[in-house]
Image: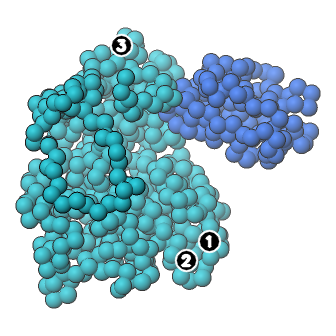
Chain colours: A cyan, B blue
Amino acid sequence: MLIFEKSESGRNATSQHVRLAHTKIEIPEKFLRTDKPLLPEVSELQVVRHYTRLSRKNYSIDTQFYPLGSCTMKYNPRGVHRLAFLEGFLQRHPLSLDINSQGYMACAYELQEILKTVTGMKGVSLTPMAGAQGEFAGVAMIRAYHESRGDTARNEFLVPDAAHGTNPASAVQCGYKVKEIPTGPDGNVDVAALQAAVGPHTAGIMLTNPSTLGVFEQKIQEIAAIMHKAGGLLYYDGANLNAILGKVQPGAMGFDVMHINLHKTFATPHGGGGPGGGPVAVNERLLPFLPMPIVTKTNDTYAWLTEKECPQTIGRLSAFMGNAGIILRAYMYARLLGKEGLLRVAEFATLNANYLLARLRAAGFTAAYPTRRASHEFIITLKDEAKELHIGALDVAKRLLDYNFHAPTMYFPLLVPECLLIEPTETESKQVLDAFADTMIKILEEAKTNPDLLHTAPHTLSVRRLDEVKAARELDLVFKKA
Amino acid sequence: MSNIPKKLKYSKTHEWVRKDDDVLTIGVTDHAQTMLGDLVYVELPELELDIEAGQECAVIESVKAAADIYCPVSGEVIEINEALLENPQLVNEDPYGKGWLFRMRAFENENSELLTPDQYSKLVASEAH
């Protein structure tokens, strides 16, 4: 039942009552609305019950194992939230004077420094609001770099076919044509195809390493050399940074620019659409183009770097500097773990993924890249089960819900048929991993003995199998009064 | 094994072509629709558009993914299957019949790149491993 359907005319929650303004705000008549917005008229208790009930129907990292590959659904430590909720941070107005914002600016500055070390880059801007905006900023900087050199013939961006969908979208958004580069059978980029694709029109390449196939791109140095020789730059999609945190720096692999998903790697809450954090990090040659503002430090005083000091900047991406609450959480998280702790994040993320992969393979599941060690995530393919038992990735994913697990990512990457992309993250215990593996084994058994159980799953949730075609074709998102 | 009619020609990118005099009908194969799953949208080329062989000319979107359709021959679009705009699942139900995508008048007589049913069967078999 929608909250609108609980509405009754004249009922209200006094705590939310609009206070009558004493002074009239000077807004031109034509912009003032004459009708009231349609809002549900409900009591405070009704609101609390409504949303608590909804949240109990939901799967979340606070309630369930959430091995959603490519999303890094790790636990977000409560201590970090507590610190970000300190009164001084909450009450700080983004337009307050620098002298009254030194504490917050110190945190942002130190996070910039930490991210420089983690990435092996020379400069960081915290301003992009999330990953896709970070990608946009990164490609825009590459464009600005080529243009600043009068190198305007470069109109193509290379993107491997295993890339996240946002990569080609970001390149197109920045005015580039996208050329797809195929992947070899071992999961590495096809270097011969890359060599054939580069030329005087190549502006750059967007790569994720480890790739979305859950394997480390072994020929990265060769790829970097080919790109740089052709005059193109390398963009690192930081989506899978969790696997290499403190182990390898993208800067050392030859990348020129990258974004970092704070909401994945640095344990700030995500899922449900944000808010996120997608800082960009660049090497020397892209420093002048970083988006504004950036925090600088001179003699223990923090100040904002703006367009005035950095005239070549690609500009601003948000009203102030990203999402302050996310930046603070990421900073606290990095400080709580320290350099050694961040290294352990990568070690345990990869250990957990490889342990789970080994258990599933031993039980008869097929790894998509059997010759490769997993990074922080791995892919199993159910193409044989689909052929022999008529059980697909979708059926297994739905059945997992019955056993109280969030489903892994399915049907991505597109290269692998009937795939599940599984990412356990470092914050899960061996008991949880074992329970998940045991359940997967049980489901595989059910697929052989009672396949209908899978075809009609889920059985235990408030909704059954949804009509995805109807949902996609007949979107119904807006409440209309009957 | 998916259905691969003997009377048609095929492309490596899973389109089929049927020749009736000088009119070519184009669709996607049974194998392709099985891999994609239930379709939710079909975007078809404009009428009278000239398309080169190998060019992206339509998009089909399923609950799993969106896929580009590459034109198997060079020619001019003379008819599109408007029924698909309302009911894209016709492609799932009848890929070689009611689920056809568009018709063309070819510029060239024969596209030698196209596969015979036997060659296409082998391609599908090799992709399954």
Q: Residue at x 53, y 46 (%)?
A: A185
- Quarter of the image where one finds residue A288: bottom left
Q: Nearer the viewer, residue A233 or A473?
A: A473
Q: Do the residues indicated by labels 2 and 3 lie within the same chain of the protein?
A: yes
Mark 2 is on which residue type? His
For image coordinates 56% across by 78% down, the residue present is: A147
For mark 1, what is the residue? A154
Q: Bin the neighbour count of mark 1 within 10 Å (Cα to Cα): few under 14, some 14-19, many 20 and up.
A: some
Residue B105 horizontal side relative to residue A445, left or right: right
From the image, tell me which residue sits under label 3.
A453
Asked if labels 1 and 2 share a chain, the reply is yes
Q: CA distance from mark 3 to mark 1?
A: 54 Å
Q: Please name the amino acid that badge 1 sits on.
A: Arg
Residue A122 on image: x %, y %: 34, 78
- Please check whether the numbered discs 3 and 1 fall on a single chain: yes
Q: Residue furthest bottom?
A: A299
Location of residue A395 by image quarter: top left
Q: Which residue is mark 2?
A: A146
Marks 1 and 2 sit apart, C-alpha to C-alpha, by: 8 Å
Of B32 and A442, nearer the camera is: B32
What's the chain of the residue with tag 1? Answer: A
Residue A338 appears anywhere in the view: no
Q: Dot 1: what SS?
A: loop
Circle nearer the viewer, 3 or 1 = 1
Q: CA distance from mark 2 to mark 3?
A: 57 Å
* Chain to which mark 3 belongs: A
Mark with earlier residue (3, 1): 1
Between residue B124 and residue A159, name the one nearer to us: A159
Residue B128 left/right relative to A405: right
Q: Tally the marks.
A: 3
